[in-house]
Each structure stands twice: as C-alpha cells, then as structure tokens.
Amino acid sequence: MVEGTFLLAAVILFLVLLKKPHFGLWLIAFSLPFRFSFAPVQIGISQGLKITEIIVLLTAIAVFIRKPSFNIKLPGRGFTVLFLLFLFFGLLSITGSENFDYCLTEILEYAFIVLMMLTIFNIIINPHECKYLINGLMVGGVVSLCIGIGAYIIAVLTSTKNIFVIPLAVNVTSTFRYRLLAFLNDPNFFADYCLCIMIIALTIFLWERKFNFLLFSFLSLVGLFLSFSRSAWIIAVIGLILVLRYYLSKKSFTKVLFLLTVILLILLLLPFLRNMGLLTETKTRLLTVTEEENPRLYIWKAALNAFFSHPLLGIGIGSFKSVAYQYSSEMIIYQETHNVFLDILAGTGLLGFIFWLLSIFYILIAGIRNIKIYKQSSYEYILSIATLASFVVMLLHGFTLNISTVRHFWLIAIIILILNEFNLKKEKTD
C-alpha cells in the first residue's frame, strides 16, 4: 500500500515536471532541509534515497527528455574539468581503502550533487529564474524552522521525551538541555543551513525591502541560536559584516534606519531567551570547552596522521570516520573530521585535495566577478552579493564542519556559476 502510494505520487510528480520543469527547481530547494528516506534502495551504508535525491532524479529525467538532441549545458568548463578531476582522484582513492562501502556512499553523494547541478543549470534560461531556487530555499527553511522551533519550545518547557519532539530537538549533555537540529541529522549541519538562509534572506531584505525576507532572516537567526553551534555563531557575525560592507558602501538615512530596525528586532529576543533560561546556557556554552566535550583537536590530528600515511591518494574518499581510531592514540570512535579541508585531504590525498580546492577557488572568483560586473541595484547584483556571502560563510564554517556533500552548499555554488555564465555570454554579445 505504501509502496503503491509512493509510486503513484512519483508518477504524478514526473508528469507535472514534464510540463513545468521550473517547479522542479522550487521543489529541489524546498526539500533540502528534509532528510527523509522514502525509497527502499540501499547502496553502501546509505539508508535509502532521500526526498531531495528522488526529486532531483525525476526532474533530471524530465529535463533531459525535453532537451533537443541531448544538448546538455555544463556549469562552466573550468569548474567542470576541475571538479571531475577531483572525482577521478576520489575514485582512485577507493583502490587502497579498507572501507569500500563508505567510499561508495560518498561517491554516490557526489554523483547526486553533480546531477543536481547539471539539472538546475539546464533548466534556467536567465538569472531571474534563480528566484525559483531562492523562494524554494526560503519556504523550505521556514517550514523546517517553524516546526523545529515549536518542538524545541515544547521540549524545553515540558522536559518531554515525546517521540515527536526528539527528532527535532535532541537531548544532549547536562551543560545545556537541547540543541535544535530540525529534520537534519546533526545540530551543526542545521546551524550551517540557518547560516545559508539568514545571509541570503537578510541581503535581499536590505536591498529590496521585502519584509517576508526579514521574517526568514529572523527565524533563521533564532534557529541558529538554538543550535548552540559556537563556530556558527562567530561565523554569522563575519557574514553580517560582509553583507553590511556592501550595503553601507553608499550611506543614506534609510539604510541606517533599516539597519537599526534589524538590530532592535534582535534585541527583542533577549527577554524571551532569559525567560526560557537560555541566556545562562549560552554563557556556559561559550565559556566552557572541555576536551571530553570537544575532542576536535584529537580528530584533526588523526586526520593529518591519516593523510601522512597515504599522502597521494588518501585513505579512501568519505571513509575517515570509520577508521579514525587507527590514527589516534585517543579514544575516537566513528567520528567525523569536523573539518571539510582535512576530510578531503585525508580521504583523497594531495591530488584530490588540490583539484577540490581549485574548484572552490573557481567559484569564489566567479562570485567576486559577478559583483563587479552586474549593475548595482539590479536583481543579479543583489543575488551575487547574497550567494557569495552565503558561500564564504559556509566555507568558513567548513573549518569546524565537514560540508563536503552538504546539498545547500552546492546549491549556492551553482547559482554563482549560473550568474557567472550569463556574465560571460553578455560579454561575448557586447
């Protein structure tokens, strides 16, 4: 019965996507914070296809059926070559790995990211169509945040362990009672998602005065706070400075007034936080760092040891967490690297890391170029600032979190590449 209902829904969605592929853009972005598995497909250590992956597959099939003569566009030749070379060395790293299942799962994650980027790139005809992605990202974020924050408040006020609440607000140490993770699998990944939403929403609000985006940024700020991710808090401040640097480059009374309004709304949160006892927990979280609570230095040292043991091709892409204990004298069991740079370095070795880093630099250069070329106050200019700031913020967060296969990170990357591609076309036309 469940399988039949699922199949029927998939067929109906596919028929809709054949007629309106742009709806697929909205759905892909909307589904990012919801990590549910629906299809009974297990490969490697995966628990099945996630909702985003199903939508990407259906949208991709619909788009490539509609494409005449299989005229598939690639998202920037430079980026495509660099990223494919990284994946090539990632595949080579599997040959010397002890954990084939972990490597295979990671490769499949990247395969879905590539498919997602190709699908989006082949649907969008002009930069204004990126609005489908931005709107889907915001609506998905609001739904996830509202449900998550509501569950968090219930958990804190009632000290409940209700089956509905626990997946949304996880009970942790005695230092602070709950950390919000909504529908993602870790509070730190949820914090990264909130960073992405907050920076984009705030940028669009400041330039376009759309108050729904102020609501989006406010909710994501609350979600970010309740994730209790210290590194995300610090990086959020850097992101705000980055956005305001462009916003205040041309001073005006209206801009200052709007900025003061945003600060006032943030201050209005303080009484609410104090009444829930969260200010004390925040202070404790910021000032208390024990080796038992935060063993990241041991994990980073283990990742470096793994790299030095296999410097060229690495220990196998995505397999570090399964073998971390082999490279450390400390008790490290099934731990992520908590650092995307060290994860890529340990997993794919120096060769894979170089091409991954060059891919990232390509995106950063494209983002800077977009800001310089597009006219100020145009939608493309606003989107260029929002996406570049969001990408930089998430990349900085990558120093304390492994974001290598985080979908919203690569969604922002493809928007930057789309804007850059239309830049290049415009230059050729001129």
Image (cartoon, rainbow, N blue to C red):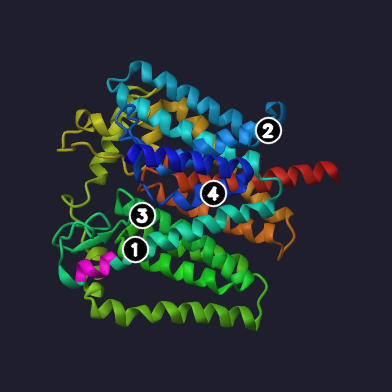
Mark pair 2, 1: CA separation: 39 Å
Label 2 SS: loop
Check residue 87 in the rendering and tell me which mark sits there, or answer none. Answer: none
Check residue 67 in the rendering and tell me which mark sits there, or answer none. Answer: 2
Give the amino acid type for the residue marked by disc 1 in the picture.
Ile
Give the amino acid type for the residue marked by disc 4 in the picture.
Ile
Q: Which of marks 2 and 3 is nearer the N terminus?
A: 2
Q: Which of marks 2 and 4 is nearer the N terminus?
A: 2
Residue 246 position within the rendered picture, expressed as x and y whole percent measured from the top left? 62, 65
Residue beneath label 4, please? 412
Residue drawn at point x = 46 percent, y = 27 percent:
352
Give the foreground label among 2 and 3: 2
Residue beneath label 1, please? 147
Label 4 close to label 3 by CB (< 8 Å): no
Q: Earlier in the sequence, mark 4 or mark 3?
A: 3
Label 4 SS: helix
For the residue carrying disc 1, how many other residues have a C-alpha within 10 Å: few (<14), some (14-19), or many (20+)? some
Check residue 190 in the rendering and tell me which mark sits there, or answer none. Answer: 3
Relative side of 291 to 376, left or right? left
Residue drawn at point x = 61 percent, y = 36 percent:
63
The answer, for residue 357, to whether it is visible in the render is no
For the residue carrying disc 3, how many other residues have a C-alpha within 10 Å: few (<14), some (14-19), or many (20+)? many
- The single residue placed furthest to the top in the displayed view is 95
Give the amino acid type for the residue marked by disc 3 in the picture.
Phe
Label 2 close to label 1 by CB (< 8 Å): no
Give the foreground label among 1 and 4: 1
Residue 416 position within the rendered picture, expressed as x and y whole percent measured from the top left? 61, 48
The answer, for residue 242, to whether it is visible in the render is yes
Residue 26: in magenta span: no
Task: Depth check: give the residue in front, 27 or 175.
Answer: 27
